[in-house]
Image: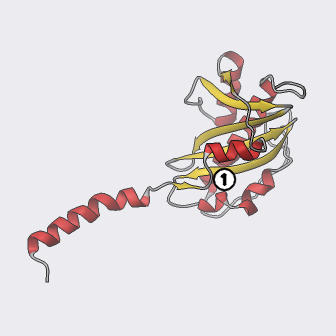
Amino acid sequence: MFSSSIKKTLLVLVSCTLPLLLQAATVYESQTEFLDRAFRGSPPEPEVIWLSGDKKSTVGQILGHDYPALRLRYWCEAGRSAWVLEEVGKEQPITVGIIIDADHIKNLRVLTYRENRGGEVATASFTDQFNQLMLDEDNQLNEQIDGISGATLSVYALTRLAELALYLHEQSRCEVGSS
């Protein structure tokens, strides 16, 4: 049916594109949609927090490594902050949006998931267990997160990002009455 050269060409094309298909990102929510949801359609201008000195050291302790950026943007209004952070699960970065109200997590959602396995961490049944959690005196969540079999590294990544967002919220100037 197909000539030998056409078969070889098709094989090369499939071989080249298959890894790209397997690594395709699943976008659950854009950053714009996340911020609109966090601030009821009217997000404030972003602010910046620098990761230097003691902050850099504490961030390294929370993550187990340095964060790849020296500064992070965040959005703050009336004691509520929103953070868009990334952490590698097993091999690929996971982009997470986290809303902090006062001193607890109001909402955590996976915005973009790039791993081949473990996508269950993006389900509301998993992420909702972060709601209302706070940091303890050791910069760890005050309650345990139930894991997902086969997604251990992704679960750890989301847990670290939740701790990071809570810590950064404490370090920011995001207070009730601030804009």
Q: Does 44 sit left or right of 175 as displayed?
A: left
| Residue in the foreground of this view, choosing between 90 and 19 | 19
Tell me which residue sits at (71%, 46%) in the image: 159
Residue receiving disc 1: 155
> Could you tell me which secondary element the residue under label 1 belongs to?
helix
Tell me which residue sits at (74%, 48%) in the image: 108
User: Eyeballing the image, is 161 above or below 173?
Assistant: below
Tell me which residue sits at (81%, 33%) in the image: 138
Name the colour scheme: secondary structure
Q: Which quarter shows the N terminus? A: bottom left
Q: Position of residue 151 (x, y in %)?
A: 61, 59
Determine which quarter of the picture holds residue 176.
top right
Mark 1 surroundings within 10 Å by alpha-carbon count, few (fewer than 14), some (14 through 19), many (20 or more): many
Q: Position of residue 90 (x, y in %)?
A: 53, 50
Tell me which residue sits at (67%, 62%) in the image: 148
Residue type highlighted by circle 1: Val
Across the whole image, how many numbered discs are drawn on residues? 1
Residue furthest bottom in the image? 1
| Residue in the foreground of this view, choosing between 142 and 84 | 84
Q: Does 120 sit left or right of 93 as displayed?
A: right
User: Eyeballing the image, is 171 above or below 122?
Assistant: above
Q: Position of residue 8 (x, y in %)?
A: 15, 68
| Residue in the foreground of this view, choosing between 103 and 61 | 103
User: Eyeballing the image, is 122 above or below 105?
Assistant: below
Q: Does 147 sit left or right of 8 as displayed?
A: right
Determine which quarter of the picture holds residue 46.
top right
Q: Which quarter shows the C terminus? A: top right
| Residue in the foreground of this view, choosing between 98 and 88 | 98
